[in-house]
Each structure stands twice: as structure tokens, then as C-alpha cells.
Amino acid sequence: MKYLCPVCGYPELPRAAQDDLICPCCGTHFGYDDYATTYDELRRTWMKKGAPWFSRAQAPPQGWDPIIQLARAGMIPFELGGARG
């Protein structure tokens, strides 16, 4: 079973977003980064940085597009991500 990152919409987390899991996509360290910051705030910060892929050990999926990923997860209006793919 795969889990969705509540910050960036990455759909391949190996377990629920908690207990020191770090999302390879946005780099959110659950249980630490989200302690006093909302997922929406973390998402905005990630997007302001250009929504870069975080992990150096795990490559992004082929054809990965953060805007399409966010749109598919319902985290931004589909119109913003839909035109790209």
C-alpha cells in the first residue's frame, strides 16, 4: 500500500506521513517540520522554492511534474495543472 504526502501530493510514500518519515519529493520531515506548521504553509514554502525534488538518493519518477502532481492530489485547482499534461 502506498500513501499520499499531505504537503506535496506525492502518491508513493511507503507509509503514512508521520513518525520521522521524510517525503522524497518535498522533503517534509513528518513529526518535525509539521509540528508547528500546517501542511498548507509547508506546501506554499515548497512551491515558493520552485517545488524542487528533494531527495538526492531517490530520483523523481519519469516525467515527474510537481504542478500536475499537486493538481491530481486536489491540492491546487486542476486548471492550474491540467494544461501541462
Image (tube, rainbow, N blue to C red):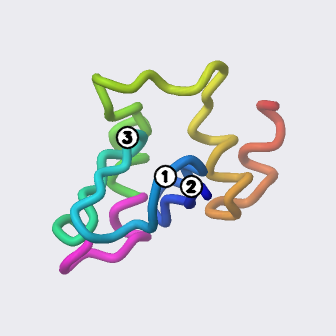
Dot 1 and dot 2 residues touching (CB under 8 Å): no
Q: For mark 2, does the 10 Å Cα neighbourhood hold few (<14), some (14 to 19), or many (20 or more) residues?
A: many
Which stretch is magenta? 34-43
Residue appearing at x 40%, y 66% in the figure: 17
Look at the numbered disc 3 and give the secondary structure of its residue. Answer: loop
Type of residue at label 2?
Answer: Gly
Tell me, for residue 55, which label it has, or none: none
Q: Which residue is mark 3?
A: 24
The residues tagged by marks 2 and 3 sit, at their Cα atoms, a distance apart of 11 Å
Read off the residue under disc 1: 13
Depth order, front residue of 78/25: 25
Q: Is residue 28 left or right of residue 85?
A: left
Residue 70 % position (x, y): 62, 51
Say what amino acid the circle numbered 1 marks. Leu
* Residue displayed at 56% across by 60% down: 4
Q: Is residue 37 left or right of residue 52?
A: left
**Farthest-out residue, front:** 1
Q: Amino acid at mark 3?
A: Pro
The secondary structure type at the circle numbered 1 is: loop
Q: If the image is split into quadrants, where does the C terminus sit?
A: top right
The mark nearer the N terminus, 3 or 1, is 1
**Residue 56 within the segment the image draws in magenta:** no
Q: Which residue is mark 2?
A: 9
